[in-house]
Image (cartoon, rainbow, N blue to C red):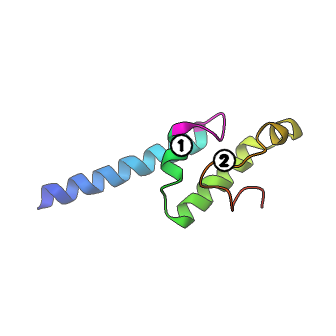
Amino acid sequence: MRTLLGMIVGLVLAVAALLAWKTYSIATPYDDLWVGLNSRMPGPVRAWTCSTVEQRLLKTDQAKAQFKQPPKGCESLWGG
């Protein structure tokens, strides 16, 4: 039982680390892996990742013009 619990905790930590890494390292908000992970996260986590990516990538008017559509999972959170 302890081994199973340890594996579950390890898996949760690995997914959280991957999501955080992708959030801070992607070059486009349409990155397939990030969108796939982010769209399945609970509301508060999705809100944090969407706002972090938006702040990082939409600093210039050129970037705002390039990334007009919000990524999947950020539709209600993007631009606000």
Which one is in front, 10 or 41? 41
* Above or below for 59 versus 5: above
| Coordinates of residue 32 in the picture (x, y in percent) | 54, 38
| Coordinates of residue 18 in the picture (x, y in percent) | 45, 43
Give the secondary structure at mark 2.
helix
**Mark 1: amino acid:** Trp
Q: Residue furthest left?
A: 1
Residue at (65, 41) in percent of width and height: 29
Residue at (84, 39) in percent of width and height: 65
**Mark 2: amino acid:** Val
Magenta residue span: 25-32
Q: Residues within 10 Å of mark 1 (few under 14, many from 20)?
A: many
Tell me the residue that label 2 is attached to.
53
Which one is in front, 18 or 40? 40
| Coordinates of residue 73 in the picture (x, y in percent) | 59, 55
Tell me the residue that label 1 is attached to.
34
Kindly indicate whether the residue at mark 2 contacts the one at mark 1 (C-beta within 8 angstroms). yes
Comparing labels 1 and 2, the label whose residue is closer to the camera: 1
In three-dimensional space, the C-alpha distance between marks 1 and 2, rounded to whole angstroms, equals 10 Å
Q: Is the magenta region chiefly helix, strand or loop?
A: loop
Residue at (66, 51) in percent of width and height: 52
Picture disc at residue 2: none
Give the secondary structure at mark 1.
helix
Q: Is residue 50 left or right of residue 62?
A: left
Q: Is residue 53 left or right of residue 21?
A: right
Q: Is residue 30 magenta?
A: yes
Q: Residues within 10 Å of mark 2 (few under 14, many from 20)?
A: some
